[in-house]
């Protein structure tokens, strides 16, 4: 589904990603772990098309297409979804408005008609229940005045509604208490499917207790310094990042 | 001709003649005055607007009423500065509430007016107030007796129909102790050049609450001066929503004087395009302790439009524990648009919490990217965010019919693409 080859990325004079290689197949869950500042968010942003970075080398192929060529909204319509580490607050646009506008632009891209109003309400109510959110959140401005945990749930709500193919979760676990973490994990797990892949960016291993990854990669100083199975996360938890960073 | 000609009480004569002297001496304000340095009103003097005479033909205002007269409200209609009972909807007012034209009030509420008219603002303020005081033809009078809480809003609808006309109207609103009322001032006009100069005085007595919404949708070529002057007694609450949409040149002054623990909220939205000049001047004067003021003005300026925000917050020596914030945010949609913003804090007390902030800029890239990452194309994202910037202010309106009216005005001024009304 996703193939990243020798990707290098800079901001100004500073090289942030220094040759990333990663192969992700449909149905897989990949965890990317690493210390703060190692380049995890940069990688997530590059995959979803955020501006302000310069790709200095390498290639990213998504479902056989050149991902880096596509504008961000086309990537989203093609099924790439980023749950942001720091979701943006948008005053004056209600959550339900954004959800409907987003869903309809995806549908339109795939030649489908606009979602029926009743079907839409049924769908979002179901997802709101899944994430144990209050329906009132639907009518509030996007993320405005939401707590850290509420913002993260809201990201997963959007993901559940858009049903993307490649889900990138950037530190969705940070700022969540243990109950919220369980709810969010259940939400993610309910979306697991053979034709969907996940990239779980996280700093801590605890999220991986609830969402079991197939592969774990350690990112340090802009490079993947170690890859392994789920057991690598436990090992990291025990020994700390210095163990792999030194390697 | 002049509806008030017959009301020649001596106090009013004196007030008017003082104002006339004042106006003769100073004329309309010049850009040399600090408070007017961004507002060049010389065009008004050159234009030679004249008062409407009886000889001018009546214009059908049915369409305007359909669009702008609020349902579920009491409304008083002024056409070219004179009250029209036949167009107004004033049936079923509670007894403890007086809503009438200013001309009528000068007869039946003379004592109240003698105590109030000219007390929230004097003709010394500047030329427009002097001019208005000397020449106002009619207006709205509202008095809500103590403890009365009105369930429906009161609207005054100002309609300008005549080219090159000049109208001066005066409104006095009194909410007695513990009364509560919502009022709406709407300004509209037929596509002409004209000048409307409206002065409103509001007296919010102890523990009373007044919400006043101004919707300025004057014609494109019109000139508008509006001054709102408020006296807030102990614990009084005053909320103002100021929507400036129309006019070639519009200037709006809003001043409030706060006594102990009074609360004042000033919201504003100005949308300028083409060569519009929209000017807002606010002054909040905390005279006594424990007052609260919250101010947020937002402007969106396109083409060669210019928006001005001058906001002053004055905290007197005696006004300890004042809690005040003032913010002005501007969005420039074109390289030729301009926003001048000048917040001023004058604090003479030492134990206060006062903050202010201003921004002038473009849409935030992070927000655009966020929407793009949710499958929305860049142009639609920009439209949505621009609209959202304005919609935040529209959403502060609690009266559903008024909310919809203002929303419709905002939507008229935005590219429609990407804005789905059914979900707003
Ligand atoms: N826009 C930027 N400009 C300059 N430096 C940046 C920018 N974005 C990220 N960086 C730097 O790149 C490094 C990686 O950042 P980031 O991807 O956010 O790391 P992580 O998500 O792993 O904590 C950090 O040193 C950060 O300061
Ligand atoms: Mg990060």
Image (tube, rainbow, N blue to C red):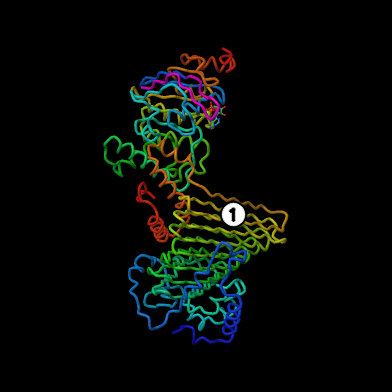
Q: Badge 1 sits on which subunit?
A: B
Quadrant in which ligand 1 is drawn:
top right
Residue B341 found in image quarter: bottom right
Q: Is residue A9 magenta?
A: yes
Q: Quadrant of the N terminus of chain A?
A: top left
* Residue B259 position (above or below residue A242): below
Secondary structure of the residue carrying numbered label 1: strand
* Residue B150 position (above or below residue A35): below
Residue in front for this viewpoint, B206 or A225: A225
Q: Quadrant of the C terminus of chain A?
A: top right
Relative image position of residue B69 (x, y in whole percent): 38, 67
Query: Number of labelled discs?
Result: 1
Relative image position of residue B215 (x, y in whole percent): 45, 63
Relative image position of residue B218 (x, y in whole percent): 43, 66
Residue in front for this viewpoint, B66 or B380: B380
Crowding at dot 1, Cα within 10 Å, few <14 / some 14-19 / many 20+, comes out as many
Q: Which residues are magenta?
A: A1-19
Ligand 1 within 8 angstroms of badge 1 C-beta = no
Instruction: Give the residue displayed 67% in from the left and 58% down from the top.
Output: B346
Residue in front for this viewpoint, B106 or A11: A11
Relative image position of residue A16 (x, y in whole percent): 53, 25
Q: Is residue A178 magenta?
A: no
* Residue B228 position (above or below residue A51): below
Instruction: Give the residue displayed 48% in from the left and 19% down from the top.
Output: A19
**Residue at image mark 1:** B326
Q: Is residue B10 left or right of residue B303?
A: right
Q: Is residue B238 left or right of residue B82?
A: right
């Amino acid at each position: 589904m996703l193939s990243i080859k020798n990707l290098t990325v800079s901001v100004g004079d500073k090289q942030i990603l220094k040759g990333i290689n990663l192969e992700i197949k449909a149905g897989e869950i990949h965890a990317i772990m690493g210390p703060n500042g190692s380049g995890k968010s940069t990688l997530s942003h590059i995959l979803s098309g955020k501006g302000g970075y310069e790709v200095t080398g390498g290639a990213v192929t998504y479902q056989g297409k050149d991902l880096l060529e596509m504008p961000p909204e086309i990537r989203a319509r093609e099924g790439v979804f980023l749950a942001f580490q720091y979701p943006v607050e948008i005053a004056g646009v209600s959550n339900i408005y954004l959800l409907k506008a987003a869903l309809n632009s995806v549908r339109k891209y795939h030649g489908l008609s606009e979602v029926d109003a009743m079907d839409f309400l049924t769908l979002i109510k179901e997802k709101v229940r899944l994430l144990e959110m209050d329906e009132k959140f639907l009518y509030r401005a996007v993320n405005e005045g939401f707590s850290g945990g509420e913002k993260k749930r809201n990201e997963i709500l959007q993901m559940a509604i858009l049903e993307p193919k490649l889900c990138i979760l950037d530190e969705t676990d940070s700022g969540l208490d243990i109950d919220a973490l369980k709810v969010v994990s259940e939400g993610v797990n309910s979306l697991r499917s053979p034709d969907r892949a996940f990239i779980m960016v996280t700093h801590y291993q605890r999220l991986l207790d609830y969402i079991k990854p197939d592969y774990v990669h350690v990112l340090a100083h802009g490079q993947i310094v170690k890859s392994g199975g789920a057991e690598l996360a436990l090992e990291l938890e025990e020994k700390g990042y210095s163990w792999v960073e030194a390697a | 001709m002049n509806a008030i000609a017959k009301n020649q009480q001596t106090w009013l004569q004196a007030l008017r003649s003082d104002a006339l002297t004042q106006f003769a001496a100073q004329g309309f304000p010049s850009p040399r005055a600090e408070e007017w340095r961004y507002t060049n009103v010389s065009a008004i003097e050159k234009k030679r607007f004249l008062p409407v005479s009886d000889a001018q033909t009546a214009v059908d205002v049915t369409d305007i009423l359909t669009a702008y007269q609020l349902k579920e409200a009491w409304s008083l209609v002024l056409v070219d500065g004179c009250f029209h009972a036949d167009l107004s909807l004033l049936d079923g007012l509670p007894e403890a509430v007086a809503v009438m034209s200013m001309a009528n009030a000068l007869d039946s509420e003379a004592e109240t007016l003698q105590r109030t008219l000219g007390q929230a603002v004097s003709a010394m303020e500047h030329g427009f107030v002097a001019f208005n005081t000397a020449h106002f033809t009619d207006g709205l009078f509202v008095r809500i007796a103590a403890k009365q809480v009105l369930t429906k809003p009161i609207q005054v609808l100002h309609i300008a129909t005549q080219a090159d006309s000049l109208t001066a109207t005066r409104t006095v609103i009194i909410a007695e102790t513990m009364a509560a009322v919502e009022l709406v001032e709407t300004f509209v006009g037929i596509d002409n050049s004209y000048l409307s100069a409206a002065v409103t005085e509001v007296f919010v007595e102890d523990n009373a609450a007044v919400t006043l919404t101004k919707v300025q949708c004057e014609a494109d070529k019109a000139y508008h001066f509006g001054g709102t002057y408020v006296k807030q007694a102990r614990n009084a609450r005053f909320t103002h929503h100021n929507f400036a949409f129309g006019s070639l040149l519009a200037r709006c002054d809003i001043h409030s004087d706060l006594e102990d623990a009074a609360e004042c909220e000033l919201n504003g939205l100005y949308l300028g395009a083409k060569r519009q000049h929209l000017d807002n001047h606010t002054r909040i004067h905390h005279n006594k302790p424990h007052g609260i003021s919250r101010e947020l003005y937002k402007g969106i300026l396109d083409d060669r439009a210019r928006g001005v925000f001058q906001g002053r917050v004055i905290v007197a020596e005696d006004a300890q524990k004042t809690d005040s914030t003032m913010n002005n945010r501007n969005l420039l949609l074109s390289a030729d648009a301009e926003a001048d913003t000048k917040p001023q804090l004058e604090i003479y007390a030492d134990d206060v919490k006062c903050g202010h902030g201003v921004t002038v800029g473009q849409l935030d890239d992070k927000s655009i990217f966020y929407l793009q990452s949710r499958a929305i194309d860049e142009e639609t994202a920009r439209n949505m965010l621009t609209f959202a910037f304005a919609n935040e202010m529209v959403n502060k309106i609690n009266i559903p019919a008024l909310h919809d009216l203002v929303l419709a005005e905002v939507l008229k001024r935005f590219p429609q693409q990407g804005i789905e009304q059914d979900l707003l």
